Amino acid sequence: EEAIPAVLEAEAFKKWYSDASLVPDFMPHNEYVVFIDDFHIQPAHRARVLEQVRRFLTQNVRPGDRVMVATSDPSLHIRQSFTDQSPLLAAALNQIEKLPARGMETHNSRKTALRALFALQEEDVREGEPCAPNIVTPVESYAQDVRDGVRRAIASLTLLVNSLAGISGRKALLHVSD
């Protein structure tokens, strides 16, 4: 019986694993989880990234493997529970493509914070105080918003990973975000 290597380099693993003749009969099937952080991904990037996810799944999922698709936008949503049916996965990814991407919210929040910072600086310069303490307020507000968004994404990811603990077999998580 062929032993499963304990540690494999990424390229060696891909070659070993992608060649069906090298996969031992006793090797368990994989459970893939595609986690799309839709709250942080830019709309302009999402279509390209989802196409890369489709290509990854086509090239790496073997017969018997199952895939789950989940999004965080901003809370966890299971878009497709574990399945080995390609049409269901394609439908889930197509559905995600049609959802509003929320990544621009962070971008717009950053722009708003910078505008407020520059407006405060101009006002402070007019009043003879080029770097007053109030200049930090919009930056702190933006930083808090970003921190909250990251914490929500981590909470969703933690919930998802913890729920996978009860499922036997190999699991691989593909985290998709900007």
Image: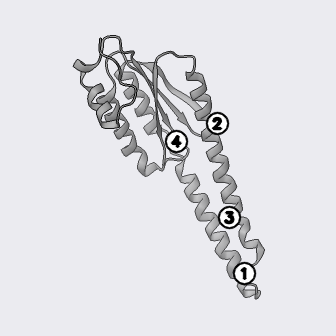
The residue tagged 3 is: 139
Mark before the other along the chain sequence, 4 or 1: 4
The residue tagged 1 is: 123
* Callouts 2 and 3 close, C-beta under 8 Å: no
Q: How far across and how far down the image is residue 113, in percent?
A: 64, 65
**135 up-or-down from 97: above or below:** below
Mark before the other along the chain sequence, 2 or 3: 3
Identify the residue at horizontal 69%, vertical 54% (top origin): 144
Asked which secondary structure carries label 3, the reply is helix
Q: CA distance from mark 3 to mark 4?
A: 24 Å
The residue tagged 4 is: 38
Q: Residues within 10 Å of mark 3 (few under 14, many from 20)?
A: some
Front residue of 71 and 33: 33
Q: Quadrant of the N terminus?
A: top left
The residue tagged 2 is: 155
Of badges 1 and 3, the one in the foreground is 3
Q: Residues within 10 Å of mark 1 (few under 14, many from 20)?
A: some
Q: Quadrant of residue 94?
A: top left
Q: How far across and how far down the image is residue 138, in percent?
A: 70, 65
Q: CA distance from mark 1 to mark 2?
A: 40 Å
Of badges 3 and 4, the one in the foreground is 3
